[in-house]
Amino acid sequence: MTPEQITIQKEEVEAVIGYKNTERHFSEIINEILNALPEKIEPCAGYALIDKIDYPDKKSIRLQDIVLNTGPIVTSQLKNAESMFLFLATIGGKMEKWIDELRKEGELAYSYIADIIASAAAEKTADFIHDYIAEEMKKYYKGVSNRYSPGYCDWNVSEQHKIFSFFPKDFCGVTLKESALMTPIKSISGIIAAGEKIKWKDYLCDTCNARDCTYRIKNKQNKNQQRKS
């Protein structure tokens, strides 16, 4: 995966900021940061494939001998899987350092927008590995689910430690603190289900307690695009 493969449209950034018609000053900042993005990120992603799956109850999933307490929402979306893909994606730490430098220099608008773009780049990196898995599963006539991460849909963020146990130490240069915070920060871990009975579904944002998250924003953007088409 190369930095050039992580593409973000200006309109995506504007949607997160919340402006329909971004002021010229902010528009120029967005363009400047997007142009600099390939030099500021080091995208890396991978997955662990698990075929030994069990559902002890409606709130958990057992992968091999490890039980993930995913909660009822996530578990319901991943049931009937034949395989599970645990994934890890990151854009590295260069962008994070740049954002810190911008803050220290008092460039608050730049640092704010750069942080939004960094989060979008991390999601695009996760999209890349997600799409790769989906294409591979098509060869076997299997579908894939949406992806779910600890910290969302009532899945406790501490479960991140269980996901990391399936990966080699420092995989893609990502480490996990005791608090379950990943370093670099712009990293994503999670789970994707695959199988003949698995279909991709929108995130169940209306049933989730997290009111301000990336997936809720993505759902809103997808629905807006569907209305326009």
Image (cartoon, rainbow, N blue to C red):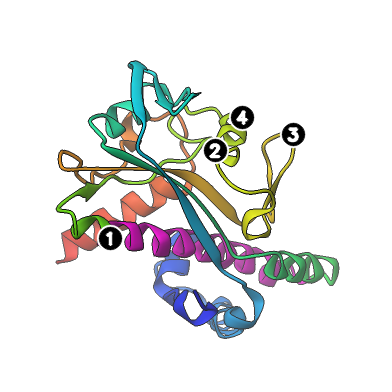
Residue type highlighted by circle 3: Glu
Q: CA distance from mark 4 to mark 3?
A: 9 Å
Mark 2 Cα-neighbour bin, 10 Å: few <14, some 14–19, many ≥20: many
Residue 188 in picture, x, y percent from top left: 54, 51
Q: Which mark is residue 136?
A: 1
Q: Read off the residue under disc 2.
A: 163
Residue positioned 45% across, 73% down in the render: 8
Q: Is residue 115 left or right of residue 129?
A: right
Residue type highlighted by circle 1: Glu
Foreground pick, 210 / 20 = 210
Q: Is residue 208 visible?
A: yes
For label 2, the SS is helix
Q: CA distance from mark 1 to mark 2?
A: 22 Å
Quadrant hosting residue 39: bottom right
Q: Is residue 115 left or right of residue 146?
A: right
Q: Earlier in the sequence, mark 1 or mark 2?
A: 1
Q: CA distance from mark 2 to mark 3?
A: 14 Å
Q: Earlier in the sequence, mark 2 or mark 3?
A: 2
Residue type highlighted by circle 4: Ser
Mark 3 Cα-neighbour bin, 10 Å: few <14, some 14–19, many ≥20: few
